Image: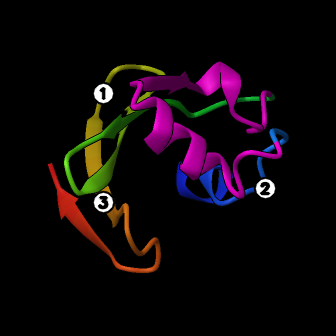
């Protein structure tokens, strides 16, 4: 979800994509489940997403938790700053 959001056109004419602005500003962005367009009725869990600009890559870390705290899991997704189509996943 975070990668798809970063691949959207940016509203600022100085940037082609939202990812371009993120790289330029080099700020850490945290998005929690309240900021995502996910169903609210009878939720089974939550997700928190952290986007970090690294030297050569953008790192997206997603942590999901069951509503009853019975299980938590996380995954990492990286994509290259110089070529957004080059990416990799890591279990964390």
Q: CA distance from mark 3 to mark 1?
A: 28 Å
Rounded to the nearest angstrom, the CA distance separating label 3 from label 2 is 20 Å
Marks 2/1: CA–CA distance: 38 Å
Q: Secondary structure at mark 3?
A: strand
Q: Is residue 17 above or below residue 73?
A: below
Q: Which residue is label 2 attached to?
A: 9
Q: Which residues are magenta?
A: 13-40
Residue furthest to the bottom: 85
Query: Where residue 62 sits in the image (x, y, percent)?
Result: 38, 41
Q: Secondary structure at mark 2?
A: loop
Identify which residue is drawn at 14% across, 48% down. 92
Q: Contact, CB < 8 Å: mark 3 with mark 1?
A: no
Which of the colour schemes (rainbow, by chain, secondary structure, one colour) is used?
Answer: rainbow
- The residue wearing badge 1 is 70
x%, y% of residue 19?
56, 50
Task: Please name the residue that numbered disc 3 is placed on.
Answer: 78
Q: Residues within 10 Å of mark 1 (few under 14, many from 20)?
A: few
Q: Which of the two labelled residues, at mark 2 and mark 1, occupies the earlier sequence position?
A: 2
Specify whether residue 4 is in view: yes
Please give the name of the residue rendered at 28% of the width and 34% of the height, measured from the top-left corner.
Answer: 72
The quarter holding residue 40 reads top right
Q: CB of mark 2 within 8 Å of CB of mark 1?
A: no
Please identify the quarter of the rendering in which residue 68 is found: top left
Name, please, the residue furthest toward the left: 92
């Amino acid at each position: 979800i975070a990668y798809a959001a970063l691949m959207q056109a940016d509203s600022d004419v100085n940037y082609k994509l939202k990812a371009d602005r993120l790289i330029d500003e080099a700020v850490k962005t945290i998005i929690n489940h309240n900021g995502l367009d996910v169903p609210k009725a009878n939720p089974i869990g939550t997700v928190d997403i952290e986007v970090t600009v690294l030297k050569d890559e953008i790192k997206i870390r997603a942590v999901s938790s069951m509503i009853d705290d019975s299980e938590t899991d996380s995954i990492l997704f990286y994509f290259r700053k110089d070529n957004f189509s080059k990416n990799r996943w890591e279990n964390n």
